């Protein structure tokens, strides 16, 4: 297949337009404006390309854009997924929305995570349209809200759309990502007995009792969890994220609350994490009859893994080799992505995207050449997959 030329200036102009639109997630920052404005921009852009476009309005100012390039029929469908929200732009050392290009990089909030991936997947479809290439299978662009917090965007997508496979264009340093960790959030409530600070025989200090929980969590992370390993993801982990308790200096605290995050491997489900926490607390109770606690695994996201032998992984791998003239690296990510939601919905998914630095940091940038390479790989992957 002849290589389709990517219009560099058009691609970078699109990316800079996207960065210049403030789309900070309002669940992460009180200044967050949501995705409505950037969704309108993308809607108009996709309409101009001739795609079938619609909004999915999830909440006020929380909007998905779905654009479909219809195929002629008889070919597999491919979903291209990217999120339009960003983390907070507060305290950045650069103008977060200037989208300045300097020394082969573009700077700004969301430049790497992940407006570059969004620009690449849109430009890939645009390049196919402008080259006059006809596809048999549909290409479904899902530009979603809220990936940085609760993923209500991709959850709304899978309620209405499906595909034979998907590519998520998160930044991967041009590696092909086939696995990532999941996570569980757990709340532990420790109950003591309030008493005057001068009456230790009457009080049960819930904060001191919570110290036993923290010690047990540290031991769990150092021993049991370290014994589990995954070839791409290493070991699971656990840490205490938040703690609160007590009323005043001269009173034994009757309550303390700890919130934990547990990072999970593909083989670990919610039931396993729940049993692990139950056993941890029971072991403390066996050694201390004044220890009373309850817990709740109140939010769970599964880990993700796809076989490198899956057709969509092989498709992206062939496209990468064709463009880059070397074999790709298959990698895992420790963070969580919307790929797990797509996989749970029965859509085989792979992650591939550009290079850069500073995601969520005070200086964020994306490498320009890597965006072009990502777009080229996407073009060939789309054609290969949708025209079997």
Image: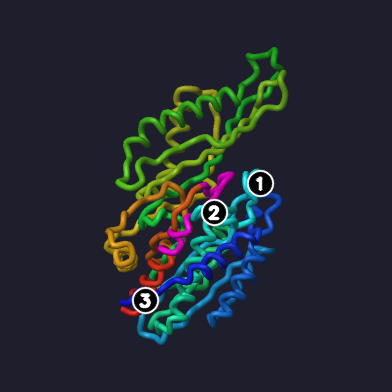
Q: Is the residue marked by circle 1 packed among few (<14), some (14-19), or many (20+) residues within 10 Å? A: few
Characterize the local packing of mark 3: few (<14), some (14-19) or many (20 or more) Cα atoms within 10 angstroms.
Answer: many
Q: Earlier in the sequence, mark 2 or mark 1?
A: 1
Image colouring: rainbow
Q: Nearer the viewer, residue 23 or 273?
A: 23
Q: In terms of depth relative to the viewer, which is nearer, 267 or 66? A: 66
Does 87 appear above or below 168?
above
Mark 3 or mark 2, which is nearer to you?
2
Image quarter (top left, top right, bottom left or bottom right) of the N terminus:
bottom left
Direction from residue 292 to residue 370 in the image, left or right: left
Provide the residue designation for mark 2: 102
Give me the disc on residue 383.
3
Residue 327: % across, % down: 27, 58
Measure the alpha-carbon separation of dots 1 and 3. 41 Å
Q: Nearer the viewer, residue 164 or 110?
A: 110
Distance between the Cα atoms at labels 3 and 2?
Answer: 33 Å
Residue 241 in picture, x, y percent from top left: 55, 37
Extreme residue in the bottom direction: 72
Magenta stretch?
Answer: 358-373
- The secondary structure type at the circle numbered 2 is strand
Q: Residue at x 51, y 64 (%)?
A: 118
For the residues labelled 2 and 1, the Cα–Cα distance comes to 22 Å
Residue drawn 32% across the image and 42% down it: 229
Depth check, mark 2 against mark 1: the one in front is 2
Circle 1 residue: 90
Q: Quadrant of the C terminus?
A: bottom left
Judge whether 363 appears above or below 97 on screen.
Answer: above
Instruction: Examine the image and state in which quarter residue 33 appears.
Output: bottom right
């Amino acid at each position: 297949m002849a290589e389709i030329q990517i219009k560099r200036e058009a691609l970078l102009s699109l990316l800079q337009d996207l960065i210049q639109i403030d789309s900070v997630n309002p669940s992460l920052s009180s200044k967050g404006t949501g995705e409505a404005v950037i969704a309108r921009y993308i809607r108009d852009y996709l309409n101009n390309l001739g795609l079938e476009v619609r909004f999915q309005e999830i909440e006020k100012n929380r909007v998905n854009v779905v654009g479909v390039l219809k195929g002629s029929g008889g070919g597999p469908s491919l979903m291209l997924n990217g999120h339009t929200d960003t983390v907070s732009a507060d305290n950045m050392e650069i103008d977060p929305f200037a989208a300045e290009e300097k020394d082969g990089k573009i700077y700004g909030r969301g430049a790497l995570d992940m407006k570059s991936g969004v620009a690449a997947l849109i430009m890939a479809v645009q390049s196919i349209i402008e080259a006059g290439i006809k596809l048999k299978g549909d290409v479904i662009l899902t530009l979603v809200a809220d990936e940085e917090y609760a993923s209500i965007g991709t959850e709304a997508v899978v309620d209405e759309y499906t595909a034979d496979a998907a590519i998520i264009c998160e930044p991967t340093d041009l590696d092909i990502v086939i696995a990532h960790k999941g996570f569980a959030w757990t709340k532990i409530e420790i109950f003591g007995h309030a008493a005057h600070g001068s009456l230790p025989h009457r009080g049960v200090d819930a904060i001191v009792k919570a110290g036993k929980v923290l010690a047990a969590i540290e031991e769990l992370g150092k021993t049991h969890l370290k014994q589990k390993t995954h070839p791409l993801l290493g070991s699971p982990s656990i840490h205490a994220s938040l703690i609160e308790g007590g009323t005043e200096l001269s009173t034994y605290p009757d309550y303390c609350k700890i919130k934990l995050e547990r990072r999970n491997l593909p083989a670990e489900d919610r039931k396993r994490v729940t049993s692990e926490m139950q056993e941890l607390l029971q072991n403390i109770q066996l050694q201390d009859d004044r220890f009373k606690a309850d817990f709740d695994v109140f939010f769970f996201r599964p880990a993700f893994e796809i076989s490198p032998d899956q057709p969509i992984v092989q498709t992206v791998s062939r496209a990468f080799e064709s463009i880059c003239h070397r074999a790709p690296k298959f990698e895992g990510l420790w963070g969580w992505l919307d790929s797990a939601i797509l996989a749970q919905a029965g859509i085989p998914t792979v992650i591939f995207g550009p290079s850069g630095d500073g995601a969520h940091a005070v200086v964020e940038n994306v490498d320009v050449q890597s965006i072009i390479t990502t777009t080229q790989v996407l073009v060939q992957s789309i054609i290969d997959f949708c025209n079997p």
